[in-house]
Image (cartoon, rainbow, N blue to C red):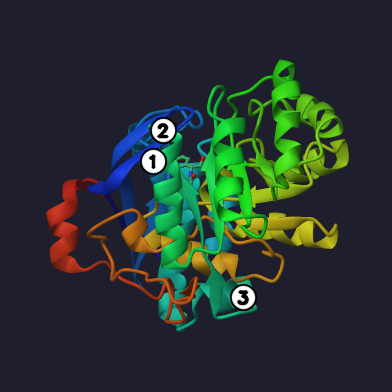
Amino acid sequence: MKLEGLELRRVSIPLVAPFRTSFGTETVRDILLVRAVTDAGEGWGECVAPAEPHYSSEYADGAADVMRRFLVPRLLAADRLDAQQVAPLLAPVKGHRMAKAALEMAVLDAQLRASGESFAAYLGAARDRVPAGVSVGIAESVPALLDTVAGYLDQGYVRIKLKIEPGWDVAPVAAVRQRFGDDLALQVDANAAYTLADAGTLAKLDAFDLLLIEQPLAEDDLREHAELARLIRTPVCLDESITSAKAAADALMLGACRIVNIKAGRVGGYLEARRIHDLCRAHGVAVWCGGMLESGLGRAANLALAALPGFTLPGDTSASDRYYARDVTEPFTLDDGHLRVPDGPGLGVTPLAGVLDELTTATELLPVA
Ligand code: NPG
């Protein structure tokens, strides 16, 4: 395949409700989409970098800049291109994994649409539907949180993840456990909001039989996570810290986590995400698929990834209406607590032309003529 051009497209999609985490509140998702134009057809990628660099160092304008100036020219210079070559070609540019992941996704989509194979089949999916968990933001009050969780359980979600931060941890978790009972699959996500000095507070969560606590400490605190893991019973899961298969191997060897959240964007692409899955599976470590409030394009790819056999815990792969009243693709809907894994060529979904244009705030075609 020859890459002939690359379109950067910004879309802005209002969230159905504000989403508050320990690092900020989102009301609108400002997404950078990329469209690869090749001699074999086109393909779509989604960059998960948020508008601001609070989850990690990456942010959407920065991703667009590094694509425009450093990444896309390297791909355009290649005579022939397939998805496997994207990461090696981009390796001389340090970091910027979310930007690289979006480009690899677009090339892989074009490649698979041309060959008629789905993302799921290509990645090695073992099932055609995956259980849906839901991530619940920090609420105004405990009663408001209980209402929100009740609503999601009524819709059929099979696992609840509560966002926590210092001052919003033991009390909301206790209230949810008490109201919905011991059978509820429940986990928490701190987005790096604590330090080792909070081990005493975090140990209080042991009483609630959580599936896991996600990223309690800072991204680069692997040793401290290992220490914390010895002080609490709840299994530690890492998200922000796992930036590559190597980082995952280091974390497992150090005893920094027992479970891994896999997000293709955070690790530089779906191919690296699959390597982390393979590594964890070989070590008997459970993985699950994280979410970054993706549009239907990124969601389609995440569902394919989440269908791999090592994804033994429900992911943050919720239905489209948990996020958006209007998505750029046909919405993904919940069916008995599950989402269907797309099986058409490539992502198996395409943007709805009219809706995409209405949500678009800027487009740019590279190379500039
Ligand atoms: O369902 O897509 C989803 C959201 C899941 O909580 C979720 N994502 O820290 O994992 C996270 C958080 C996030 C969202 C992080 C957007 C960064 C951006």
Callout count: 3
Give the residue furthest to the front. Answer: 179
Instruction: Judge the density around disc 3: few (<14), some (14-19), many (≥20) Cα neighbours within 10 Å.
Output: many
Q: Quadrant of residue 284?
A: bottom right
Q: Nearer the viewer, residue 135 or 350?
A: 135
Residue of label 2: 141
Q: Nearer the viewer, residue 14 or 359?
A: 14
Which numbered dot is residue 324?
Answer: none
Q: Pick whichever of labels 3 and 2 is earlier in the sequence.
A: 3
The residue type indicated by label 1 comes to: Ala
Can you identify the residue that label 3 sits on?
125
Does 241 appear above or below 298? above
Q: Nearer the observer, disc 3 or disc 1?
A: 1
In the shown orientation, is residue 44 left or right of residue 313?
Answer: left
Q: Secondary structure at mark 1?
A: helix
Question: Would you say the beta carbon of the disc 2 residue lies within 8 angstroms of ligand 1?
Answer: no
The residue pinned by badge 1 equals 144
Q: Position of residue 146 (x, y in %)?
A: 45, 46
Q: Secondary structure at mark 2?
A: loop
CA distance for labels 2 and 1: 5 Å
**Whole-percent x and y of residue 309?**
70, 71
Label 2 crowd bin: few (<14), some (14–19), many (20+), radius 10 Å:
few
Q: CA distance from mark 3 to mark 2?
A: 40 Å
- State the CA–CA distance, disc 3 to disc 1: 38 Å
Q: Could you tell me which quadrant the N terminus lies in?
A: bottom left
Query: Which amino acid lies under the numbered mark 3 shown in the image of this protein?
Result: Ala
